[in-house]
Image (cartoon, rainbow, N blue to C red):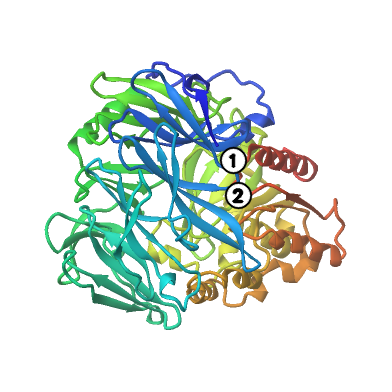
Amino acid sequence: MVAGILLAQLCVSATAQTGAAAPAPRKEWPIEAFAELPLMERPELSPDGMRLAAKVARDGELMLMIASIADGPHRVRALQLGENDLNWWSWVNDEWLIAGIRAETSVEGMPWSIGRVASIKSDGSKIIILGKNAAAQNADDVIWVARDGSPRILLAYQTSIYSNLPGFWPQVDSVDVSTGRMRQLVPPRQNVMSWYADAAGTVRMGVGYDDAARTSKLLYRADDRSGFRVIDRANRRRDESMVVPMLFTAEPGKAIASDDHEGTDALYEYDLARLELGKKIFAAPGFDIDGIERDVAGTGLTGVYYTADGPGVHWFDPGLVQIQADIDKAVGAGRRARIMSTSRDHSRMIVHVGSPDQPGSYYYYDTSAGAMSLLSKVSASFGPGVHLSPVKTIRYKARDGLEIAAVLTLPAGRDAKNLPLILLPHGGPFARDSEQWDWWVQFLAYRGYAVLQPNYRGSSGYGTAFANKGEGQWGLAMQDDLNDAVDWAVQQGIADAKRVCIAGASYGGYAAMRAAQRDGSRYRCAISYAGVSDLAAMMRYDSRFLNHGTRKDWMKEQAPDFFAVSPINFAAQFSTPILLMHGKKDRRVQVGQSREMAEKLKAAGKVVGRDYIYVEQPLADHFFSRQADRLEFLQRMDAFLKEHNPA
């Protein structure tokens, strides 16, 4: 359904403030303010900079918005998502954009996640599901988008769900997004699931993987007149790896690749003929890079993204270097300016200005006019000038001497002394926390808790050696790292050792369950949202997906003995009250992980309401996509903490 709404409801014109915002007088914020969905997320400009596409919230639900922001009447189109997940969106030209969507359907009696690409006309008048009837399970891999203004993309997609048929392996088609017409360029090739194209739209590379043999191969061709040949191989069982280029340069046979041979992922020149790394282009010492921004031609680098203690970017383009410096000076100390999207010529851009204690706002910056105007606040309640609890990165030593970074948020206006503490491990576990706005963290700090988010061993972003230290340590040394974070906070005088609760979602939820079962004497209570309780059951669920053999290998490396570190097998050992919450529509971690944990606790003689509480949200997913689910979670957590670990 496509509906029109007034731009004024979402985007308000204003002049950007300059300098550091003065702290607002403390006021009472309702719990609903923290549960609000972001008014705008990930805005992206069209190539001419005259329109934007973004995910927005209306009436507690998320939708895709397309808006004219530069000329004429400010017209907006909002596309309802319904049961679909909106994973990404990107402009093809000034009139058409594409979006990756996923939905769950029943295939042979089993729930399957189906991916598609929708092409959308900028005025919202036309939506085409590409390959709607021809595609099978996965059809949302766009490997190239035209840069000449034509409505063309290259789409890799499956045509069969059966691995014994050729169509199980994706083919690559040239697609006209304005009509939906598709023409095959590269036929399916056994075991090749990933294809890559150069800036001109020539499919140059494919990565094949044989799950049974655990072997990979890299296929390459110099141009579209040549056949693919295998130029590199790797055997996972021998811990071999391949360098897969990120970008093909204008120079024949040359590319840019990421490699971690110096400890962290860095950018290098790469020779495709000799399979050799060349000059280092960029590294963020001590941290991995996150991704790259291509230049206008698509054959060079405009920038590279990384996360140190907070998000960072290094611009190669001199014009963007100067613009970034000008914006940083304008917003002043205490706030961060991030260029989120630019027009093709970099004359117009969207800039986010905010800080870890403030969700911030999105601004439209016309460089020719030299002025920024407000597009949208991120939060309806916490606007410019509102600063909540301060955030900083600390480092502590684990019991074996490993240095670990953690994000510490302290309640505003209170002495950092003898505070109640919430230990909040991140999900993943191959992920990490950094100094960014976090609605969950800020709510807890507002209630008076110190919040500590350790990037325990096995977390991403700190290099290969640090990530590898998580191997075999699920529920063991990784759990010890969490306990050591608590000890640090107590030793620093920040936390009261008798008033500590652990909470988390996904793997963080697993860690909370494991703490309640293994280390209950350390914690007044535990809170798990969408947590994993049974690793063996998780692997049985994952066995329905492609390359599940490799996934199982990886999991066995992380947790060699599933039984020994799965909380569900030790319900009788739970010794601290736990709140279990899970969304019934969670497609990442099945709801049975929490539902069955609650059943095991009951069978072990634990008393509902005293020893455990289980709440199942009928419409919730893994990512708090509905405001009503966020609010219920905060309300339930708030009540649980007031009973078991009051601030």
How packed mark 2 is, by other alpha carbons closer than 10 Å (few <14, some 14-19, many 20 or more), is many
The percent coordinates of residue 592 (x first, y second) are 71, 62
The percent coordinates of residue 109 (x first, y second) are 66, 67
**Counting residues from the N terminus, which is met first, the one under dot 2 or under dot 1?**
2
> Image height check: is 374 above or below 537?
above
User: Which residue is at a point 39% across and 66% down the rendered structure image?
Assistant: 170
The percent coordinates of residue 413 (x first, y second) are 60, 27
The residue under label 1 is 441
Q: Quadrant of the C terminus?
A: top right
> Image height check: is 221 above or below 513?
below
Q: Is residue 109 visible?
A: yes
Name the side, left or right, on which 66 lies relative to 248: right
The quadrant holding residue 636 is top right
The quadrant holding residue 476 is bottom right
User: Which residue is at a point 23% across and 72% down the rendered structure image?
Assistant: 228
Name the side, left or right, on which 179 lies relative to 273: right
Secondary-structure class at tag 1: helix
Disc 2 to disc 1, C-alpha distance: 8 Å
Q: Nearer the viewer, residue 615 or 560?
A: 615
Q: Nearer the viewer, residue 209 or 91?
A: 91
How packed mark 1 is, by other alpha carbons closer than 10 Å (few <14, some 14-19, many 20 or more), is many
Q: Quadrant of the N terminus?
A: top right
Secondary-structure class at tag 2: loop
> Image height check: is 16 above or below 404?
above
Which amino acid, by three-letter code, is at mark 1? Val
User: Which residue is at a point 35% across and 48% down the rendered structure image?
Assistant: 306
Which amino acid, by three-letter code, is at mark 2? Leu
Q: Is residue 264 visible?
A: no
The percent coordinates of residue 136 (x first, y second) are 48, 63
Q: Which mark is residue 353?
A: none
Q: Which mark is residue 424?
A: 2
Q: Are marks 2 and 1 in contact (CB under 8 Å)?
A: yes
